[in-house]
Structure formats: structure tokens, C-alpha cells
Amino acid sequence: MMNPTIKTILYATDMGKHMRPVFRYAIDMAKTHDAKIVMLHVMEPLSSGILTTIDVYMPNFNAQEVRQDGLKKALKKMQQRLNNFCEEELVKKPSDCEFISKVKVVDGRSAESIIHQAEKLNANLIVVGTHTSPSVSSNILGSTARKVTQLSKIPVLVVPVYE
């Protein structure tokens, strides 16, 4: 049996402060397989209740404009965090940052958007983290990670993140 070919890895992040170990796994997988990494953050849409409240109390408020601004700010934040990671953790091997080919922020439901982006990019692996806590049963996956593993036709590496 041949080993799977991994050329594109989709690393999905919620930009939580405990996600560095997950990113390290993505980089190690990229190095092992000489693959590229696409970093992805999904911004969940505002609920209809929030949109209605905004419309009632702030009629001149342009939710779409604010949303686009939010996407741009999230992308800038991701790029800054990537730069910080490369400076702080990859000092000895700065070439490891060359495995990251793209940073993306998209609008949508997390699990569905992760899968859609992975398919669109022809990714061979999805890397996601799942928050775990000693007080929670260890066999409970985070809802996004669980849904991605259930829906994806692409292999998914789920990395536990302890808080």
C-alpha cells in the first residue's frame, strides 16, 4: 500500500491563544510531506436576532460594511500572529515559515466553510484543534472538530488543546 500524498494542508484556526500546538502539528506535517499550508479562519455570521436588533436601534448602521471590515481585521490579526509565531518559535528554522502559502479569512458556518475551502483548495489533509479540559470527558470533541470529521471526505487530524 502506498503512503498518501499530502501536498496541501488546510490548517483551520479559531485564533484562540492555545492554538500554537495545533499549528506546530500542521508545520511538522508540511515538513514531513513537503506540503504547503493554507491557514484558515472562519467568521461565523451574525444571527438574525442580532441583525434585527442592530436594524431597530441603529438604522444607519451598515452591517455588511462592518462585516467586511471585520474580515479585513481578522486577516490582519492572523498575519500578525503568524509573523509572531515565526519570529518567536522558528528562530532556529525560519525556513519552516515558507511552508505557509496563504492566509485566508472567510465568512460562514465553521465546519461547512472549512470543508468547502479544503475541497476548493484540493487539500489532502485538514488540521484542526479541539479544546479539551480535564473536567470534561476526554471522548468529547469540540463541536466544530466533530462536525468536520463527520462531514469531510478529506482526512482530518484533530489535535487536542488543553486549557
Image (cartoon, grey):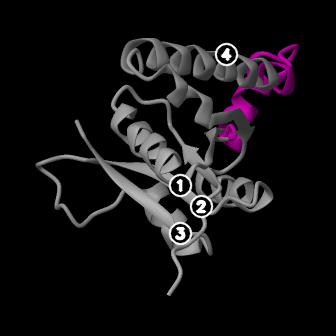
Instruction: Judge left or right: residue 128 versus residue 101.
Output: left
According to the image, label 2 marks what residue? 6
- Decide whether the magenta segment is chiefly helix, strand or loop: helix
Pick whichever of labels 1 and 4 is earlier in the sequence: 1
Q: From the viewer's perspective, is residue 62 above or below residue 156? A: above
Q: Nearer the viewer, mark 3 or mark 2?
A: 2
> Identity of the amino acid at label 1?
His
> Magenta includes 58?
yes
According to the image, label 3 marks what residue? 155
Q: Residue at x 52, y 18 (%)?
A: 81
Alpha carbon distance from label 3 to label 2: 10 Å
According to the image, label 4 marks what residue? 76
Q: Are marks 1 and 4 in contact (CB under 8 Å)?
A: no
Q: From the viewer's perspective, is residue 18 above or below residue 3? A: above
Pick whichever of labels 4 and 3 is earlier in the sequence: 4
- Which residue range is magenta in the image? 45-66
Alpha carbon distance from label 1 to label 4: 28 Å
| Dot 1 alpha-carbon crowd within 10 angstroms: few under 14, some 14 to 19, many 20 or more | some
Q: Are marks 2 and 1 in contact (CB under 8 Å)?
A: yes
> Identity of the amino acid at label 3?
Pro
> Identity of the amino acid at label 2?
Ile
> Identity of the amino acid at label 4?
Lys
Pick whichever of labels 2 and 4 is earlier in the sequence: 2
Alpha carbon distance from label 4 to label 3: 29 Å
